[in-house]
Amino acid sequence: MSAVLRKKLESSGGVPPRVLQNKPFWTTLERTISTWLNGVLQDEGELRLQSREVSPGAALADDLFGAYVYGFRNESREFVVAVSIDNLVAARFAAQKMQQDASRLAEAPQLFLQLLLEPPATRLSEELATTFDMLGAEGEVPEAAAFEGLEIEGNCLVVYYLCDLDGQAFRIGVALKLDAVLAMADSAGDDSLGGGAVSGGKGLSQPRVQNSSVQLDVVLDRVPMTVAECLRLEAGSVIELPGTHRSKLTVTANTVEGPVDIAEGELGVWKHQRAVRLKSQIDPAFLQEVAAT
């Protein structure tokens, strides 16, 4: 694993790159939680990702934060492990049910709010399992269980979202079995290969992989500057490029690890349009890095 990839992995809470790159998973997860939360709050707000990290199952009780945490199990197909709901969501939901002001219910007995929130929390676990086709062998939905009594093997993906409404940030979190999420990333193949290193780019021939996109930048030159020099730049400043030539361009791909130089090229004209002609093959290390993640 490259140093750049390791740094990116650490900054993402230990979430594997092929999970981070699985855009359909994240889009579906956010949409499902957003629909549920808007229904609970009886209002529409846009979700924003707060955090995502990998947590060992044995340490999940320490990594999950929230006033109310609900546990779930499915004997034949583990996926949704827990749902975490904060006090603002609890008070808002209780206010809707009791037809009272939410500020008055913020200090309601925790046991009352815990029991009141259990049905919607269970519904969220069912909707997640159904949406991601993670029901049991006979179509069983996740079964509610005391979170404190869960024995969770392996790692979990813990994701928190915030929803801004009326000047407040309502938080909702879910803990999913990482093995199940990894399996989704492996089968999706849209943004990652997910199957380990591939020799000769064999996995790159998959249609879904070929149809995924990556942004390319053509770099004329890179100039080192001090911070002080950068601070002095303003409109009209001239930056000298003494060593540049249109036959010496660098083609860079934007990946999850950051910009990566993949080839060299030269500037020219093709069909009356500016174009870049490659002068080298795509760097094999780039293909191997993509396949490995």
Image (cartoon, rainbow, N blue to C red):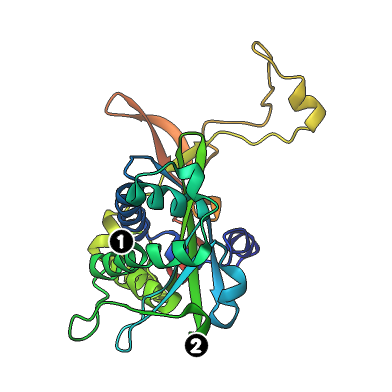
* Amino acid type at mark 2: Glu
Q: Is residue 287 visible?
A: no
* Residue 151: image tag: 2
Q: Residue at x 51, y 56 (%)?
A: 108
- Residue located farthest toward the top when viewing the structure as drawn: 236
Q: Mark 1 falls on what kind of element?
A: helix
Tell me where residue 159 appears, x and y as whole percent.
48, 61
* Distance between mark 1 and mark 2 Cα atoms: 37 Å
Residue 102 placement, left or right of 44 = right
- For label 2, the crowd category at 10 Å Cα-Cα, with few meaning under 14, some 14 to 19 and many 20 or more, is few
In-front residue for pair 1/57: 57
Residue 110 picture location, percent across and down: 52, 63
Q: Which amino acid type is shown beneath numbered disc 1?
A: Val
Cβ atoms at labels 1 and 2 below 8 Å apart: no
- On the image, the x and y values in percent for residue 3 come to 65, 63
Residue at 31 percent across and 54 percent down: it is 36
Q: Which residue is mark 1?
A: 209
Work out whether 221 lies above or below 126.
Answer: above
Along the viewing direction, whichever of 77 and 251 lies nearer the viewer:
77
Q: Quadrant of the N terminus?
A: bottom right
Q: Residue 89: in sight, yes or no?
A: yes
Name the side, left or right, on which 119 lies relative to 113. left
**Residue nearer the viewer, 116 or 79:** 116
